[in-house]
């Protein structure tokens, strides 16, 4: 194994030379995953809409030239099937989705068709692609029926979701389960899993209505950070944490398909649930300047205040565990944006942060 490969994770050297299909590869998480896999020497094919932001991480990382890059709609079954079939992937990561709660309230049908029908299309494409040995299907921690209780949700807990986004992810889980029971459980040498991660933070996310990008936009514009739910806690975690979990899971699904098929939570450990105000304060501290303004809107659309995941299954069966605290994740994320704002290249910063993460992972 090359030194470079080792610095990106010794256990992940198994991705070198493997054919991997990633949907949603132009998005925030997809760009980090695609870049990491491509640096490991995987033959990545991606399928997603074109990036829309001027500063899209996907564009800044320049990965389009290093992979088999398809621009297509997940709702278009024929195009998706043809891209997936021609790529002949061994591993599929499905991340394409409409992932924003507020946007789901504005356009519920876009969210349901993308997340539910789009998810079903992906499952249908995989059903007809015998090359696929491992499927990692990304949904969300919001797929659980949120009871606003203090305990972490387990993989066996009830699915639900009040807002259209959460409901779409619960529905995608049910469609996945149906494909599992109806088709995949009989398929030899095929492992299939859903993953439910919490709020992910990291450099290069420019989505609307997400706390960290909102904070960075405010700081760059020398404006106060406006927060509406200062006491809301979320399971914030650095983007590399769940991505490592998805990659661990894919490798385990190849080795023991039946043993690792099922649902998996990936979230921070119990002590690391920060609230919105703590995250914003940590960002200001690491940025070096800035202020917070509280604007509580009594008529705001419903957003659950409390949602924690139990990660016992991933820790005990997969050997995965989070490496950074919520404060460390926020600090690392802020430094990514600060270094980028000061002119450093996205590729260099991202690679350095992957290497630091892998070093932390391998120290244990
Ligand atoms: N970011 C988070 O905090 C978080 C938390 C839990 C779950 N997730 C899930 O992780 C996945 C990735 O999220 P993200 O934060 O990177 O989102 P993102 O918005 O940055 O990326 C979404 C990706 O999906 C693609 N996409 C959207 N609609 C599509 C369509 N109709 N056809 C094809 N591709 C389409 C986009 O082009 C993009 O590549 C999603 O499934 C999301 O629900 C994200």
Image (spheres, grey):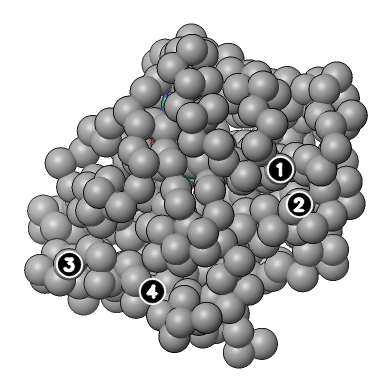
Tell me the SS state at disc 3: loop
Q: From where the camera sits, is residue 255 visible?
A: yes
Q: Which mark is residue 353?
A: 4
Name the mark nearer the viewer: 2 or 4: 2
Neighbourhood count class around disc 1 (C-alpha, 10 Å): few under 14, some 14–19, many 20 upward = many
Q: Which mark is residue 133?
A: 1
Tell me the SS state at disc 2: helix
Ligand 1, by image quadrant, is top left
Q: Are marks 3 and 4 in contact (CB under 8 Å)?
A: no
As measured in the structure, the alpha-carbon distance from the residue carrying label 2 to the one carrying label 3 is: 35 Å
Q: Which mark is residue 115?
A: none
Q: Quadrant of residue 112?
A: top right
As measured in the structure, the alpha-carbon distance from the residue carrying label 2 to the one carrying label 4 is: 27 Å
Residue underneath mark 2: 253
Q: From where the camera sits, is residue 275 visible?
A: no
Name the mark nearer the viewer: 4 or 1: 1
Q: Quadrant of residue 36?
A: bottom left
Residue toward you, 127 or 236: 127
- Image check: 181 left or right of 46? right
Residue that appears at 84% across and 54% down: 256
Q: Is residue 212 above or below residue 361?
A: above
Residue that appears at 15% across and 41% down: 54
């Amino acid at each position: 194994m090359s030194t470079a490969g080792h610095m990106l994770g010794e256990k992940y050297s198994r991705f070198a030379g493997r054919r991997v299909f990633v949907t949603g590869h132009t998005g925030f998480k997809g760009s980090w995953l695609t870049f990491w896999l491509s640096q490991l020497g995987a033959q990545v094919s991606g399928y997603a809409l074109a990036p829309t932001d001027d500063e899209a991480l996907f564009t800044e990382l320049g990965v389009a030239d290093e992979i088999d890059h398809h621009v297509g709609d997940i709702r278009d079954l024929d195009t998706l099937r043809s891209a997936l079939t021609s790529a002949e992937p061994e591993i599929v990561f499905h991340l394409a989705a409409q992932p924003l709660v507020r946007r789901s309230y504005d356009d519920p049908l876009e969210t349901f068709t993308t997340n539910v029908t789009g998810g079903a299309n992906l499952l249908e494409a995989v059903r007809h692609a015998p090359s696929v040995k491992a499927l990692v299907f990304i949904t969300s921690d919001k797929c659980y029926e949120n009871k606003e209780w203090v305990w972490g949700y387990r993989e066996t807990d009830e699915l639900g979701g009040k807002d259209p986004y959460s409901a779409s992810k619960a529905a995608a889980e049910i469609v996945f389960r149906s494909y599992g029971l109806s088709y995949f459980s009989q398929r030899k040498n095929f492992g299939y899993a859903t993953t439910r991660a919490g709020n992910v933070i990291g450099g290069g996310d420019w989505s609307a209505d997400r706390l960290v990008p909102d904070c960075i936009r405010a700081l760059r514009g020398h404006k106060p950070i406006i927060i509406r739910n200062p006491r809301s806690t979320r399971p914030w975690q650095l983007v590399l944490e769940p991505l490592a979990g998805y990659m661990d899971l894919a490798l385990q699904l190849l080795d023991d398909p039946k043993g690792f098929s099922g649902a998996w939570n990936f979230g921070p450990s119990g002590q690391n649930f920060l609230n919105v105000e703590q995250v914003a304060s940590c960002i200001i501290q690491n940025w070096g300047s800035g202020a917070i303004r509280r604007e509580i809107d009594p008529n705001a659309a419903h957003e659950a205040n409390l949602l924690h995941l139990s990660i016992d299954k991933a820790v005990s069966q997969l050997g995965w565990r989070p490496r950074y605290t919520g404060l460390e994740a926020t600090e690392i994320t802020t430094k990514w944006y600060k270094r980028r704002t000061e002119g450093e290249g996205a590729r260099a910063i991202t690679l350095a942060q992957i290497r630091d993460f892998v070093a932390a992972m391998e120290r244990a």
